[in-house]
Image: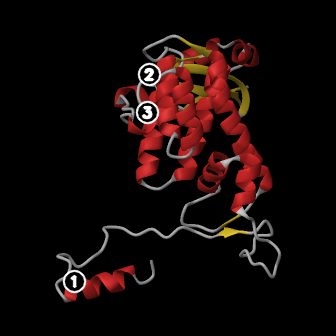
Amino acid sequence: MIYSRFWHRFLYDIGAVPFKEPYLKRTAQGLILGPDGVKMSKSRGNVIDPNEVVDVYGADVLRTYVLFMGDYEQAAPWSESSVKGCKRFIDRLWKLQEILVDGEDYSDALSSAMHKTIKKVSEDIEQMKFNTAIAAVMTLLNKIYDNGSINRAELKDLILIVNPFAPHITEEIWQQVGFDGMLNEAEWPSFDEAKTVDNTVEIVLQHMGKVRSRITIPVDMPQDEVIALAKQDEKIAAAIEGKTIKKEIYVPGKLVNIVAV
């Protein structure tokens, strides 16, 4: 990598290649440091043998952890606990088959989360932000388990976007569930931009700056209606009962604060 540009410019000068630069963009990956935060060295005894990690956890766990451990271009220390965390993630992915139900379209409960995650992972991969892409999938996985089920359409697209990070287990799930062909030849899932935008938002309700409650409102709800709804909340109503309202503060999408004494 150090000399790739040097050699390409030489080849260009002698007419062996038709363009000056060998690539549009070059990214250098960061070092994986030892568990002690120091560069791995046999003399320090802090070297991690990837073959041993594969023997214990499997290749997909190693691959996922290396991409998840931090910014791709930055150095990061090896963490055994984080490796185990990625192992739990892979195990939970496999166990989705236990809560699989029929369905050829996204369910209402998971539709928004699916579109958001596909968008996030698609964009992050292009920008080589693999750690945040994997984090987005982990968040989606939590929502799926909270929902209690995943249908075939959702599982299909989920394992498609996880495949670049964990190719072996996702291909195996693909075959186990009975999807057509091979996963690595399948088309990358698309997303609906409109469905990646939240229609509602949860805001905090405060009295005299102290949090009393929370409500969920439409994102485009007018301020006067938001404040009126806040006053109807049981805890806020009790806090301001018999008091004089001095000020009503609304921070769009975040909070309502009623100052009443």
Split into 4 quadrants, where in the image is the N terminus?
A: bottom left
Q: Nearer the viewer, mark 3 or mark 2?
A: 3
Label drawn at residue 12: 1
Q: Are marks 1 and 2 in contact (CB under 8 Å)?
A: no
Label drawn at residue 222: 2
Split into 4 quadrants, where in the image is the C terminus?
A: top right
Q: Quadrant of residue 87?
A: top right
Q: Tell which of 174 and 196 is nearer to you.
A: 174
Q: Nearer the viewer, mark 1 or mark 2?
A: 1
Label drawn at residue 175: none
Q: How many numbered circles are shown?
A: 3
Q: Tell which of 100 and 254 is nearer to you.
A: 100
Label drawn at residue 182: 3
Relative side of 140 to 84, left or right: left
Q: Tell me the SS state at disc 3.
A: loop
Query: Relative to 57, does residue 108 appear above or below in the rendering?
Result: above
Task: Name the amino acid, label 2.
Answer: Pro
- Label 1 crowd bin: few (<14), some (14–19), many (20+), radius 10 Å: some
User: Residue at image x 40%, y 25%?
Assistant: 195
Task: Residue 193 in the image: state x and y as whole percent.
Answer: 36, 31
Relative side of 96 to 114, left or right: right
Task: Name the amino acid, label 3.
Answer: Met
Q: Tell me the SS state at disc 2.
A: loop
Task: Name the amino acid, label 1.
Answer: Tyr
Task: Residue 233 in the image: state x and y as whole percent.
Answer: 66, 14
Q: Earlier in the sequence, mark 3 or mark 2?
A: 3
Residue 178 visible in the current orientation: yes
Q: Earlier in the sequence, mark 1 or mark 3?
A: 1
User: Residue at image x 58%, y 31%?
Assistant: 140
Task: Residue 145 in the image: state x and y as whole percent.
Answer: 66, 23
